[in-house]
Image (tube, rainbow, N blue to C red):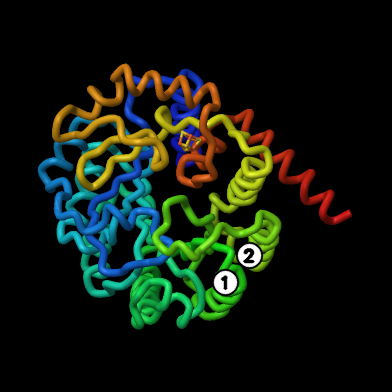
């Protein structure tokens, strides 16, 4: 029954992508719930917009949730999401109003107690299938603490991991991932970290890596060389292979890394991007955008979501995206664009297999 339900859900989203159905709710929503953050990380792309004190209120978020239809994946980010006391209430709104089954939360892992109480409340929602807490770590303790401007941040993240690990033993819907942002400076750190996490954190199911995003804070940081990044991806993929076998998403990660590297190599969209069709971004202040790269199209405090989503500006931007006038390697938009375009999924699978064969020969 689960397989049938999942297939129906997959078919609906894929059809939405095929028809470029702009009038309907984007099934992947990235929701910045706050600009508040306790850390000041060198690689942060959002640093100029942090701590603005103009987050959407619970009622404003409720209004958004009531306007939207069903949502496949809700990605909660910020700022630090667990600084919001109504975190579980926000999750509950989307679970109940939008049939959200999967929630992913990016966190720096600093607030162990708050995370505990909020996660426990969210897990009371029986219709939720999956809650993934993604803890950001950028290297071993000294490097991580320096980059994040806080001497306790690595240990706090581990404390949060330990707490979540215990909670996860009682409720299998809770998963823990680690995420690292890669620069030219921390490739070796991330490699060491990956081994550390694999050896000491048996409840972490996945270590994801992402390229540093443009407009980062610390100017001395650089993007990594593509070849070094590729080798790091391969190394981590091999290391985590055994643990990943249990996870459905693990099939797509090599395809995602392949698509990112091909996009860098070709300097254009390799997988046609469906941002603005399958995915949307709502920022903490109510700005609405198709992705985190393009400028927002409007603000929920002036217009409703669908007034913005169906506006002439949104149509012009969608046409430009379809004409491949932009490109990027941003995972959160690339993921649905690969998974929910069956032809692109097959293409990425063939490309990844051929690349591997070439490397092995
Ligand atoms: S390719 Fe990148 S910049 Fe262009 S719409 Fe997609 S996510 Fe945004």
In front: 18, or 55?
A: 55
**Secondary structure beneath label 1:** helix
For disc 1, the neighbor class at 10 Å (few under 14, some 14 to 19, many from 20) is: many
**Secondary structure beneath label 2:** helix
Q: Earlier in the sequence, mark 1 or mark 2?
A: 1
Residue drawn 50% across the image and 56% down it: 212
Residue drawn 44% across the image and 33% down it: 275
State whether residue 323 appears in this view: yes
Picture layout, residue 151 above or below residue 92: below
Q: Is residue 274 found left or right of 58 in the rendered image? A: right
Can you tell which quarter of the image residue 245 is in? bottom right
Provide residue 177's location: percent of width, then percent of height. 46, 63
Are the residues flagged by discs 1 and 2 in contact, CB closer than 8 Å?
yes
Which mark, by number, is residue 353?
Answer: none
Mark 1 C-beta to ligand 1 under 8 Å: no
- Residue carrying label 1: 194
Which mark, by number, is residue 236?
Answer: 2
């Amino acid at each position: 029954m689960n397989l049938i339900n999942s297939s129906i859900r997959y078919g609906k989203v894929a059809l939405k992508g095929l028809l470029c159905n702009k009038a309907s709710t984007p099934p992947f929503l990235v929701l910045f719930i706050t600009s508040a953050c306790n850390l000041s990380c060198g690689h942060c792309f959002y640093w100029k917009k942090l701590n603005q004190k103009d987050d959407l209120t619970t009622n404003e978020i409720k209004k958004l949730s009531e306007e939207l239809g069903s949502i496949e994946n809700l990605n909660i980010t910020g700022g630090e999401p667990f600084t919001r006391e109504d975190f579980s209430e926000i999750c509950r709104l989307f679970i109940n109003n939008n049939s959200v089954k999967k929630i992913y939360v990016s966190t720096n892992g600093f607030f162990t107690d708050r995370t505990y109480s909020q996660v426990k409340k969210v897990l009371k929602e029986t219709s939720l299938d999956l809650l993934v807490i993604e803890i950001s770590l950028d290297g071993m303790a000294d490097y991580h603490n320096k980059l994040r401007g806080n001497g306790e941040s690595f240990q706090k993240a581990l404390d949060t991991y330990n707490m979540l690990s215990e909670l996860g033993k009682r409720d299998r819907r809770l998963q823990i991932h680690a995420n690292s942002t890669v620069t030219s400076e921390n490739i070796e750190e991330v490699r060491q970290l990956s081994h550390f996490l694999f050896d000491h954190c048996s409840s972490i199911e996945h270590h994801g890596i992402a390229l540093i995003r443009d407009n980062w804070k610390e100017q001395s940081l650089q993007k990594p060389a593509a070849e070094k990044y590729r080798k790091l991806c391969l190394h981590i993929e091999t290391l985590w292979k055994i643990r990943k076998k249990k996870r459905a998403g693990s099939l797509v990660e090599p395809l995602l890394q392949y698509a990112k590297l091909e996009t860098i190599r070709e300097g254009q969209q390799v997988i046609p991007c469906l941002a603005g069709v399958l995915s949307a971004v709502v920022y903490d202040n109510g700005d609405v955008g198709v992705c985190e790269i393009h400028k927002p199209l409007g603000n929920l405090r002036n217009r409703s979501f669908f007034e913005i989503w169906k506006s002439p500006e949104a149509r012009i931007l969608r046409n430009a995206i379809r004409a491949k006038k932009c490109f990027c390697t941003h995972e959160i938009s690339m993921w649905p664009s690969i998974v929910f375009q069956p032809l692109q999924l097959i293409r990425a699978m063939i490309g990844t297999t051929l690349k591997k064969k070439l490397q092995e020969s």
